[in-house]
Image: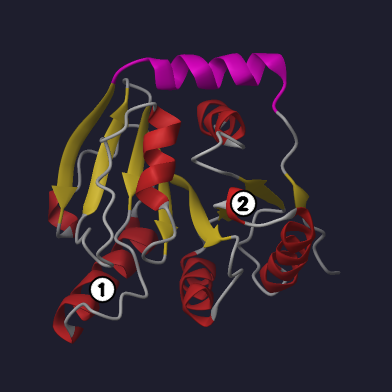
Amino acid sequence: MAMTFSLTPEPEDEAREAGRLLFAGPVTFVKGVVAMSGLPPADRLEVCFAGRSNVGKSSLINALTGRKTLARASNTPGRTQEINYFALGEERYLVDLPGYGYAEAPVAIVAKWQALLKQYLSGRVTLRRAFVLIDARHGVKAVDEEILTLLDRSAVTFQAVLTKVDKINRVEREAVIEQVKGALGKHPAAYPEIVVTSSEKGEGIETLRALIATME
């Protein structure tokens, strides 16, 4: 039976408030990790953000946390070469994974990042969900399929997050949502709801905060 995908609804008041409180509290950079041995203790639930380079991942993390420079935004693809850990108070880790699909990075560095990514996704027991960012201007591309397949193989539940929806019109938005739904239908690890966001306009930010705060 094919899975049916829908847009994540607006959060209930209680969940919205939980998200607000979580992200209004302390948000601190913990460390950048370049090997599995450097991961912080697995003592709390964590979620990770993955996406191809220039998808707007840093901007989204900054919008979520309300801190303009927490995650480093760069016009140079592949700048983030580490798994970056941020603590949301004492309850959660928010994990920023290296961007993928970076054409300008040296082959050896790409191979090292890919190996670390596979090890992390397969071996982090406290990882509850991966949020995979998809640029609304382009939809799911071949390079995204690679990470989605890796998440399937790692048995990590992932949820698609459309970014930059303010850059397209309503007709384009509807078309890309249908394209993403079709692509996700091939992946057994896909969560059946899609979050639509705009870091610039604030759309979907409260929804993502609520999801992270209420996850068990």
Mark 1 and mark 2 lie on one chain; the one further toward the N terminus is 1
Question: On the picture, is 1 further left or further right than 201?
Answer: right
The N terminus lies in quadrant:
bottom right
Question: On the picture, is 192 further left or further right than 145?
Answer: right
Asked if residue 99 shows in the view, the reply is yes
User: Secondary structure of the magenta portion, mostly?
Assistant: helix
Mark 2 belongs to which amino acid? Val
Label 2, residues with CA under 10 Å away: few <14, some 14-19, many ≥20: many
Q: Which residues are magenta?
A: 11-26
Rendered residue at 78%/57% (across/down) = 5
Q: CA distance from mark 1 to mark 2?
A: 31 Å
Question: On the picture, is 195 further left or further right than 37?
Answer: right
Numbered circle sitting on residue 115: 1
Image: 127 above or below 52: above
Q: How is the image coloured?
A: secondary structure
Q: How many marks?
A: 2
Query: Is residue 14 within the magenta segment?
Result: yes
Image: 135 above or below 12: below
Image: 102 above or below 108: above
Q: Are marks 1 and 2 in contact (CB under 8 Å)?
A: no
Rendered residue at 44%/32% (across/down) = 64
Pick whichever, 20 or 149, lies toward us.
20
Residue under label 2, please give it: 165
Q: Position of residue 160 (x, y in %)?
A: 59, 56
Image: 104 above or below 176: below
Rendered residue at 61%/36% (across/down) = 203
Rendered residue at 55%/56% (across/down) = 158
Query: Is residue 105 within the magenta segment?
Result: no
Label 1, residues with CA under 10 Å away: few <14, some 14-19, many ≥20: few
Q: Position of residue 129 (x, y in %)?
A: 50, 48
